[in-house]
Image (cartoon, rainbow, N blue to C red):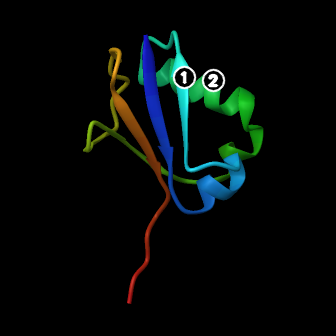
Amino acid sequence: MEVKVLFFGVLAEVSGTSFKHYNNVKSIGDLKLRIQDEFPEIVHYNFRISLNSELTDNDLMLKSGDEVALMPPFAGG
């Protein structure tokens, strides 16, 4: 099973990429732990999570082909 993770804003800078594929993750909680293990400094940033373009605060189960986006607060003018 593979999911695609999109990193936006400062999170793309922290991770050094705008997207990454992760295999064998069962839930958003599992994915967050994998991302924190790989990029420990990410814990210092606030961000929202969307699953397939829907914002969520829940630890949902993932399936192959899901797209998860990590989005820091946005400001505009």
Secondary structure at badge 1 equals: strand
Q: Residue at x 54, y 22 (%)?
A: 22
| Residue type pointed to by label 2 | Arg
List x then y, in percent, for residue 2: 45, 17
Q: Which mark is residue 34?
A: 2
Q: Which mark is residue 39?
A: none
Quadrant of the drawing holding the N terminus? top left
Secondary structure at badge 2 equals helix
Measured from the top left, where is residue 9 in percent x and y?
55, 62
Which amino acid is tagged 1? Tyr
Along the viewing direction, whichever of 38 and 55 lies nearer the viewer: 38
Asked if disc 1 and disc 2 are in contact, CB closer than 8 Å, the reply is yes
Q: Which residue is mark 1?
A: 22
User: Which residue appears farthest toward the left when viewing the image?
Assistant: 54
- Of the 4 image quadrants, the one containing the C terminus is bottom left
Q: Please state the horizontal and vertical placement of residue 38, each as a whole percent of the image.
A: 73, 30
Label 2: how many Cα within 10 Å (few below 14, some 14–19, many 20+): some
77 to 17, vertically: above or below: below
Whole-number angstrom distance, CA of label 1 to CA of label 2: 9 Å
User: Where on the picture, by quarter, is residue 55?
Assistant: top left
Image height of 40 relative to 63, above or below? below
From the viewer's perspective, is the residue at label 1 or at label 2 nearer?
1
Please report whichever mark, 1 or 2, sits nearer to the chain's N-terminal start. Answer: 1
| Horizontal and vertical percent position of residue 46 | 55, 53
- Residue projecting furthest to the bottom: 77
Residue at figure coordinates x 75%, y 45% from the top left: 41
Image point 51% across, 56% down: which residue? 8
Residue at (42%, 43%) from the top-left corner? 69
